[in-house]
Each structure stands twice: as C-alpha cells, then as structure tokens.
Amino acid sequence: MDPDPPLHETYKALFANTKISSTDDDDRRLVTVEERELPLIDLSRLSLNEAEQKQCKEEIARAGHEWGFFQVINHGISMELLEKLREEQVRVFKQPFRNKFLNFSDGSYRWGTPTATSLRQLSWSEAFHIPMTDISSSSMEPFATKVASLAQKLAEILADKLGHNSTFFQQSCLPSSCYLRLNRYPPCLIPSDIYGLMPHTDSDFLTILNQDQVGGLQLVKDGKWIAVKPNPEALIINIGDFFQAWSNGFYNSVEHCVVTHPTKERFSAAYFLCPSYETVIESCSQPSVYSKFSFREYKQKVQEDVQRYGYKNTHQKVCFQTSSRPKLKASCTETCGTEQEWLLWNEGGNFPIDELLRWVHIALLCVQDDPALRPAVSSAILLLRTNSAARFLHMIYLQPSGLPSSFSGNTCI
C-alpha cells in the first residue's frame, strides 16, 4: 500500500481552480534564491576557558538578535543517535497511509492543510506531533532527552546575555508542554507553486531542527528570502515568537518556510520549547513593546485566524502590542524630542543603538494613536539613515500600516 498521503486526490479542486505559476503580486513566488550558511557556533567552547565561554555566548546572542537563526556543532548529540532517529523516522513514515491515519492518536498525525483554499495555502507534507511525555521509542527517547537539555541551555544563555539569570524557562517549559515533530516532505511535481511548509514564524521560545541534506529550508534575511545550506554536523536553532516577546523584541522570530523538491523526499525532526497554556509571557525589560499574554490566548487567536482566513492572518505579536498607550506616548514624545537630540544620541555614542532602535519601534506603534507624532518620528529616522538598521526602519515606516514588516505575514503554530 502507498505510504504517501493522498495529497493530489484530496486537493484536486485546488489544482483545478488555481492557475499554476500565478504572478499575482499578493503571492510570494518560489524563485531561485541565494544559498547561504547560517552563523555557525561551536558549543564545545562552552567547556573551555572563561574568555572562550564568554565569546561563544556573545555569538549565540548576536545570532539570535541579527539572524533569529543559527546552527550549532559539538552540541552533545552524537551522529549515531541522529542516524538512529532518522531510521526510526523513515520506518514510521513508510507505513501505509491507512495505518498512519487510523492507528495514531487523534491529532498526532497530520498531513496537508485542511483549511487551504488555494495552492499557496497548502503544505505538501506529513508530520507526527509527539508530546515529550508520550515518547517511548528506544531510538527517540535518548534524542528527546538530550535535545530538551540543549534547548534549556541555549535559552539560559540567551536570557543571561540580556542580564536575566532566569529560571523562567525551566519552570514554564516542562516535558508536558514541549514536543517533537517528525516531518516528511514527499516529492512534488510542481515545486515552484507549492510549499512543503508555508511561510510562518514559530510560536514557541526556541526550535531545534535536525534536517537531512536534501535542503529546502528558506528564511528571510535583510528583507530577502535565502536558502539555508545544509550542514550534516549541525543542528539549526531558531527564535520563536514567545522569545521575541519575552526579550522585548531584542531576539527575532524570523519568517521561514520549506520548499518542495520535484524528485526527492525530505525528512526533518524538530523540538519545540513551549510553555504550558497558562504560562503568562511578558517582556523582561521596560518599557514593554508587548502586553502580557498567555499561550492559551495566543493559540486561541491563531485558531480564530485559521478558521476565518485559512491561515494566520497577521503576525500574532501585533495582537499583543502594549495597550498602555498614554505612558508610551509620553515616553515617545520625550524620546523623539528634537532632531538635534537624535543626532547627539547617534553620533555621540551616548545612547546604545539597540536602545535607540527600540525607542523608534515604540514610536512607530504610538504613531497609530497620535498622528501628530508622525513628523517627529519620520525626521528622526531620516537622520539615522547612515545606519543600516535605521534604513530598514525608514523603509518599514513608509508602509501604509506604519508597522514593522516583522508584524506581517502568515504564521503557523
């Protein structure tokens, strides 16, 4: 019996109703993109002298801030263990589709996109969603234990670099709320028109990905889509929405996707560091760009968007922007000040650029409520155009919504 899910048959109406290779400006065409290597960090340096440890941690924080993605080697998970995981993964996916569909608990086996109304909303893939508490396989359990430990270590480093020696992640991200997702992407005859996994940001704190060498992972860097070059020795780490909110926007949850291949199947396994539904996420510094919200509230909003639009309509972080507008308006007015003050902060080096950009971010949010602030914010950003980050802020400021582009796009949970 065929192990592949009946994607062609199930979604034949979408094929009939969708013009292949549409040039609609609202669609992101899957074109050839530049292949690049992610920042590569050797975690063995964490066991060396104090100077090496400090530099390694700084590189981790810098990659989380500038890229939102990075890769690690010497991570403590052996190649032998990863190979056993892959063998088990292939074995499970190669079962007849009927067995996978009928024999696994409700919600653990997923394929396609039930809510898709066009090919651009269809994910050409199948996956097993396995809570950590349900893992009993002798080949998966050792991997799950080690990858969970690695996620906690990286979360601690990222928090520490923000000046927070926090036990928040150990207390909030328990085995009962974290999970593994085993993915398989079957070959697709029209890879230029169908995603393996739609563009999205992850809704967790951290994701750790082990992928094969077929390739297909793409992400947004500096406003452009790039293809990630596979590294057989590395695990890929990416920041999730919750970490971006917790870090008050310092770390970046970056949009990414998987593209299909016309002849090759692709396998990957991802670990998601997630909190419980009742965990309240709030920014670790003030003034906060985000109001407090729980995982339950977040997921509810995602589900509402999926039911209404077939996908996550807007980046969920926009739903939890701080509502404490009066306080922020006062801060914005004080911060915008005069053009001379902005120049002094930037050129004199007396105001950290990251802090400066955060204030501009807040100013952009406040402009929505008080259009009178728009000239001051616009002038301030124009004065900072010699800085690449400021040029980016100027670009996003000109968008009709007045919001950073990281708040737009589709997001899956």
Image: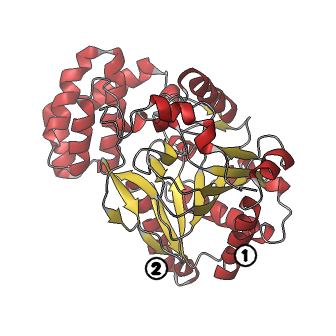
Q: Is residue 111 left or right of residue 261?
A: right
SS state under label 1: helix
Type of the residue with mark 1: Lys
Q: Quadrant of residue 308?
A: top right
Q: Give left or right: position of 81 versus 380.
A: right
Query: In the current view of this chain or complex, which residue is farthest to the bottom?
Result: 48
Depth check, front residue: 246 or 196: 196
Instruction: Give the number of the mark in front: 1 or 2.
Output: 1
Q: Which mark is residue 51?
A: 2
| Residue 379, position as x, y percentages in the image | 15, 30
- Is residue 98 something one can see in this rendering? yes
The kind of residue tagged 2 is Ala
Residue 204, percent across and down? 61, 46
Residue under the image location 46 percent in, 79 percent down: 51
Q: Quadrant of the N terminus?
A: bottom right
Q: What sort of colour scheme is used for the picture?
A: secondary structure
Residue 65 in percent (x, y) is at 41, 54
Which residue is painted at 46% across and 63% down in the image? 70
Number of other residues with Cα within 10 Å of mark 1, as a class: few under 14, some 14 to 19, many 20 or more: some
Q: Residues within 10 Å of mark 2 (few under 14, many from 20)?
A: few
Q: Nearer the viewer, residue 64 or 85?
A: 85
Q: Residue at x 34, y 64 (%)?
A: 35
Q: Residue at x 18, y 50 (%)?
A: 348
Residue annotated with mark 1: 84
* Residue 105 found in image quarter: top right
Query: Quarter holding the C terminus?
Result: top right
Residue 350, relative to residue 120: is it above or below? below
Quick check: 168 above or below 85? above
Q: How many marks?
A: 2
- Residue 323 drawn above or below residue 159: above
Q: Secondary structure at mark 2?
A: helix
